[in-house]
Image: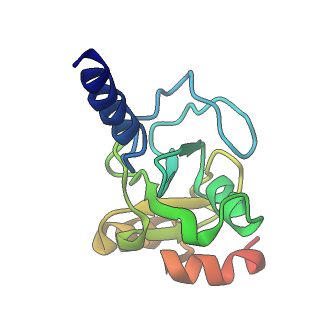
Amino acid sequence: MKNKIFTIVSFGFLLASCSSVPEPIVYGQDGCAYCEMIIMDQRYGTELVTSKGKVFKFDSVECLVRYLKEGQVEQSNVKLVLLTPFNHPETLEDAHHSHILHSQGMPSPMGMFLTAFNDESIAMKFQEENGGDIYTWQKLLDKFENLN
């Protein structure tokens, strides 16, 4: 009986450890999986969660994209890609629903001038004030190497 309970409890822990759930970024403590800098700015943190539940945290959109482009994680193993909307600090939202502004008027932590928004009209307001171009997540991935 004890072995059966131990097996059930162990299996429960195993399932919990394999869940594909994001983790909150602990600003000022967590390090970027790409550049290894401490993640500081609550308006720019990003996260990647694999299908096995491994969480990778980044201090900027550009670090996340570089990590993906270099094949650090197989695309087939990516479960979630999350960005922090500039207008909602410390929250993580699906990158596929984000609008990313590339504007020299809005410096990001790693200097590539990429800022995520969760609403296109808000991104357009910041674009009017700061210039630049707005990309969907997929368009950003397609154009990333040509951004400066």
Q: Residue at x 33, y 29 (%)?
A: 7
Query: Residue at (52%, 63%) from the top-left corner?
Result: 78
Q: Nearer the viewer, residue 91 or 134?
A: 91
Check the image and tell me how it is coloured: rainbow
2 to 33, vertically: above or below: above
Q: Please identify the quadrant where the N terminus is shown.
A: top left
What is the x, y in percent for residue 102? 58, 69
89 left or right of 56?
A: left
Residue 74 placement (x, y as % from top left): 65, 66
Expressed as whole percent of the image width and height from the top left, the position of residue 55 reads 52, 44
Total count of labels: 0
Note whether residue 102 is visible. Answer: no
Farthest residue, direction front: 1
Image quarter (top left, top right, bottom left or bottom right) of the C terminus:
bottom right
**Residue 48 appearing in the image:** yes
Residue 64 versus residue 119: which sits nearer the camera? 64
Q: Position of residue 16 (x, y in %)?
A: 34, 37
Quadrant of the rendered structure where residue 105 is?
bottom right
Identity of the residue drawn at 43% across and 73% down: 128
The residue closer to the viewer here, 37 or 68, is: 68
Up-down relation of residue 40 to residue 106 (above or below): above
Q: Residue at x 34, y 35 (%)?
A: 11
